Image (cartoon, rainbow, N blue to C red):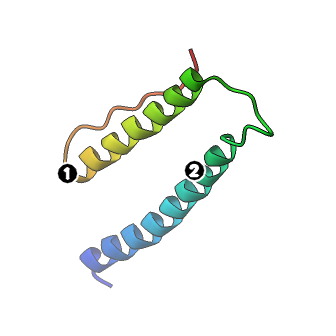
Amino acid sequence: MNETHYKSANFKRLAEKRTNEILDLLDKLANLGNKSNYEYTSEEAKQIIHAVESKFSVVKNAFNGKVVVKKRFELL
């Protein structure tokens, strides 16, 4: 197996694994939107949505060769 094939196979393996993990976590995050189980303000919901959308922009930029900035989320 040459290096290019190895890198491609490794990318595909990790991309599938990590993408599915993220999708599962997003499903769990969406469960928090169930008002019969949780209480939250519209501002808190907006903060969560903004954080996810911002990180998605970072991911898109990373695949376009731009700088990736890591930042943690905290409700204000």
- Eye-nearest disc, 1 or 2: 2
- Measuring 57% from the left and 50% from the top, which residue is drawn there? 26
Residue 27 figure quarter: bottom right
Measuring from the top left, give residue 41's x and y in whole percent.
Answer: 63, 23
- Measuring 38% from the left and 44% from the top, which residue is drawn there? 56
Depth check: give the residue in front, 20 or 11: 20
Measuring from the top left, give residue 47's x and y in whole percent.
Answer: 50, 26
Measuring from the top left, give residue 58's x and y in whole percent.
Answer: 32, 40
- Measuring 34% from the left and 47% from the top, which residue is drawn there? 59
Element on which disc 1 rests: loop
Q: CA distance from mark 1 to mark 2?
A: 23 Å
Query: Which quarter of the image is occupied by the N terminus?
Result: bottom left
Horizontal side, residue 52 vs residue 9: left or right: right
Sequence-wise, the earlier of marks 1 and 2 is: 2
Q: Is residue 74 visible?
A: no
| Amino acid type at image mark 2 | Leu
Residue 71 figure quarter: top left
Depth check: give the residue in front, 73 or 18: 73
> What residue is disc 1 on?
64
The numbered dot on residue 43 is: none
Horizontal side, residue 14 vs residue 27: left or right: left
The numbered dot on residue 26 is: 2
| Amino acid type at image mark 1 | Asn
